Amino acid sequence: MGRGLSYFMLFLIFSLAAGANRIPAIEYGYRAGSVVKKQTLKDNLKDHLSRSFSQNLSMGKGCTSISVPSDCLFRPHSQRVNPAKWKVSIASVARICKRYPHADLIVSVYTDCLHSEEQNLALSELQAWTIKQALVNRGIGAEKIKAQGWGESRPVASNATREGRKANNRIMISFGPACEKFVEDQARADLF
């Protein structure tokens, strides 16, 4: 019985070793006599986002956000997409969503105040919906994505200057379980 168990254990060890390239590796480090993971899921997500999007990466408790100018994805003051950057950006977000399927996603779109408040709100909602539909078309579940347009209600700079208006025309994409609170906190902090 003992010899059979030993052979079984050897077989199991060799089988696991042979299939090790199919098992995701987790790096461990040692600190104060305990084993800790070197990189958490949040760190992995942050790394992927910073490689895909070099623009404004924000970290909060339970949420990671990127902020990109609206003209990266859309033509100025329009719901028409900017084809040069659209596919690459949407593909990058979709890849990250697929890699982290348990992370919720919030797409928030903001505008400047060049048009009426109603027009700006409608435009931002349409742009947010367009991004959501593009991600759904790439296989991301609609229930995982919340799309919201804020219009001109949450500026981060003065609309009196061209640079300020450009800063206010932005898209924020947030990943993680606590994004709703993070987006609200950011909005309160960003009010100009």
Image (cartoon, rainbow, N blue to C red):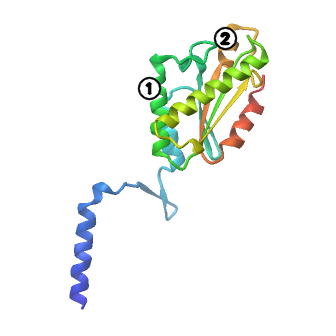
Q: Residue at x 75, y 25 (%)?
A: 154
> Is residue 153 or residue 39 the one in the foreground?
153
Distance, label 1 to label 2, CA atoms, is 25 Å
The amino acid at mark 1 is Val
Q: Residue at x 58, y 27 (%)?
A: 130
Percent from the top left, x then y, of residue 52? 46, 31
Number of the label disc, if any, that sits on residue 135:
none
Disc 2, SS: helix
Number of the label disc, if any, that sits on residue 88:
1
In what quadrant of the picture does the N terminus appear?
Answer: bottom left
Residue 31, compared with residue 126, is above or below; it is below
Percent from the top left, x then y, of residue 159? 75, 13
Q: Earlier in the sequence, mark 1 or mark 2?
A: 1
The amino acid at mark 2 is Glu
Query: For the residues carrying marks 1 and 2, which lies nearer the camera in this image?
Result: 1
Percent from the top left, x then y, of residue 47? 48, 39
Q: Which residue is mark 2?
A: 163
> Is residue 115 or residue 175 the one in the foreground?
115
Disc 1, SS: helix
